[in-house]
Amino acid sequence: MVYGAGTGHPGGDLSAADILTALYFDVLRFDPATPLLPGRDRFIMSKGHCSALLYATLAEAGFFPAERLSTYMKPLSLLNGHPDRNKCPGVEANTGPLGHGMPIAVGAAKAAKITGANWRTFVLTGDGELQEGSNWEAAMAAAQFQLDNLTLIVDRNRLQQGDGTETTISLEPLPERFTSFGWAVREVDGHDLSALVGTLRSVPFEAGRPNCVIAHTIKGRGVPFMENRVEWHHRIPTSTEMETAMTLLIEESE
Ligand SMILES: Cc1ncc(C[n+]2csc(CCOP(=O)(O)OP(=O)(O)O)c2C)c(N)n1
Ligand SMILES: [Mg+2]
């Protein structure tokens, strides 16, 4: 999709692919035939620059035909560079400007508490994204409202755009920061599907506390020449690189 569009964020897509796989093929409750079913679990892809990953997952989960993926970012496509809930079935919130998903997720989780509904809200942020102050305002509100029906997953690949998170604006000690904000925190290998599923299935971790899962990941995971390389945040593969990458990914999946 990224090669075909000539733009995109392959490093961050690959970083979170296992997380979305665990969510959509085990944890989340939804019906792709009725995307707005009132009782569905909500998933908010706050790192909206990784729209290619979200669309590929939604297509695989049955929200729309996989043939549509080839229209990614083409003129008049419903699959924009940043996800649009009015265009693409299954997209829960318009994201892309970093720092918006958490506040939206807190509102959704609070709404479920107010109405007594039992659906859950999950939100995925990047780690660099956590440098946006809105996340911490949302984190304080979630603890205040005792939103144990809310789960934040942090894609902790330690890279942002252009550099590492720790050399830009350090996030550590990240688990302790969320704990001190009143959240129940777990750390997990973000590429171990059974660990991801086990952790995400077990929410709420503690009654009355919002849940934070810090998923340790590798940006560009699955394609060795992309792994942990900051330039692959926003680089487009050449045709040779694309073929090599696809061969490696298909081999790994078989
Ligand atoms: C408010 C805002 N500022 C800047 C950008 C441009 N931008 C897109 S992705 C990105 C880096 C995100 O890093 P991280 O959250 O760690 O994402 P990941 O490593 O998972 O790709 C930036 C700065 C943006 N989308 N929104
Ligand atoms: Mg990152």
Image (tube, helix red, strand yellow):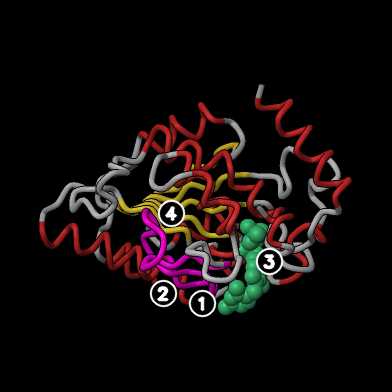
Of labels 2 and 3, earlier in sequence is 2
Q: Please name the residue shown 86% across and 44% down the image.
A: 225
Q: Residues within 10 Å of mark 2 (few under 14, many from 20)?
A: few
- Looking at the rendered structure, the number of numbered marks drawn on it comes to 4
Q: Is residue 38 visible?
A: yes
Q: Where residue 128 appears, x then y in whole percent?
A: 63, 65
Q: Please name the residue shown 43% across and 40% down the image.
A: 23
Of labels 4 and 1, earlier in sequence is 1
The residue labelled by disc 2 is: 137
Dominant SS of magenta comes to: loop
Of labels 4 and 3, earlier in sequence is 4
Q: Please name the residue shown 78% across and 68% down the image.
A: 162
Of labels 1 and 3, earlier in sequence is 1
The residue labelled by disc 3 is: 170
Q: CA distance from mark 1 to mark 2?
A: 7 Å
Q: Residue furthest right?
A: 240
SS state under label 4: strand
Q: Quadrant of residue 123?
A: bottom left
The residue labelled by disc 4 is: 152
The residue labelled by disc 1 is: 133
Q: Residues within 10 Å of mark 4 (few under 14, many from 20)?
A: many
Of labels 4 and 2, earlier in sequence is 2
C-beta proximity under 8 Å, tags 1 and 3: no
User: What's under tag 4, amino acid-wise?
Assistant: Leu
Q: In the shown orientation, is residue 92 left or right of residue 191?
A: left
Q: Where residue 99 appears, x then y in whole percent?
A: 50, 72
SS state under label 3: loop
